[in-house]
Image (cartoon, rainbow, N blue to C red):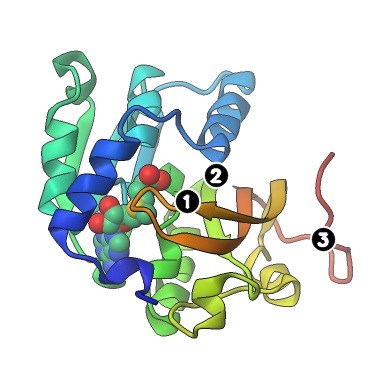
Amino acid sequence: MAAPGSTSGRDWQEYYRRTRDRPPRATTVFALEAFAREGRQALHCVDLGCGGGRDARILLAAGHRVLAVDRSAEAEAALAALPVALRRRLAFRRADLADFTPPPCDLVNASFVLFTLDAVAFARLWARIRVALRPGGRFAGHLLGPADDWARAGRCPWVDRAVLERLVAGYAVEYLDEERCRSVTPRGLRKRWHVWHLVLRREPARPPGEALTSPD
Ligand SMILES: C[S@@+](CC[C@H](N)C(=O)[O-])C[C@H]1O[C@@H](n2cnc3c(N)ncnc32)[C@H](O)[C@@H]1O
């Protein structure tokens, strides 16, 4: 089974076409609403692995600035099709996330992309995200759990609850949803998913020993 990051630009083009009109990810919406409740405006957002822009679009529409990052030229083309009024606050950087250092920002959005990196690159980028986020800033995105087909095949890094505990040190966990399901990917692959949906707020670390719980 192919790992999610190993596909060609042409495959992504098809993915972008199929997902372009889908609503933004729930994690992105959650983070956006949390900032809105705090009255925070004109934020600096970085959208890692932006794809066709389904998340970038709502961030731009809310009046925020977005640096969208993707290694695919097709992603850049997809974003170029956004309305001019939104594109005024958008910048695109074509880069491999394995070598990318996010600039200081208020939101790092990384939907369904971090598991395309190898374990070393993922660990490095995870640390850089923490450094980039200003206090009160948020991470919104997804990681894969050990029961995911791609994880079970050893094709991408995965995170169990114990590892997740370590990864979220230094953050308040605002949204945590563990999803296990079978579904067909936008490119027609039937697979078992095990996904952590996460929104984290950069804050002082939780006291040692405090349990990781879903904030219901
Ligand atoms: C599964 S798509 C997700 C797109 C979008 N975030 C979404 O939720 O619909 C993964 C995206 O990440 C990009 N990507 C994958 N690995 C990458 C890497 N190492 N560096 C930069 N972009 C990468 C792909 O080009 C693709 O656009």
Q: Secondary structure at mark 1?
A: strand
Asked if the residue at tag 1 contacts the one at tag 2, i.e. Cβ–Cβ closer than 8 Å, the answer is yes
Q: Nearer the viewer, residue 150 or 114?
A: 150
Amino acid carrying label 1: it is: Leu
Give residue 35's mark.
none
Q: Secondary structure at mark 3?
A: loop
- Dot 3 surroundings within 10 Å: few (below 14), some, or many (20 or more)? some
Question: Which residue is depicted at the point 17% across and 22% down?
Answer: 88
- Would you say 157 lies left or right of 34 here? left
Q: Secondary structure at mark 2?
A: strand
Amino acid carrying label 3: it is: Leu
Q: Position of residue 113 (x, y in %)?
A: 40, 59
Q: Is residue 170 visible?
A: yes
Question: Which residue is depicted at the point 44% across and 46% down?
Answer: 109
Tell me the quadrant of the picture where the C terminus can be found: top right
Asked if the residue at tag 2 contacts the one at tag 3, i.e. Cβ–Cβ closer than 8 Å, the answer is no
Question: Which residue is depicted at the point 23% across and 20% down?
Answer: 86
- Would you say 211 lies left or right of 72 here? right
Give residue 138's mark.
2
- Would you say 158 lies left or right of 65 here? right
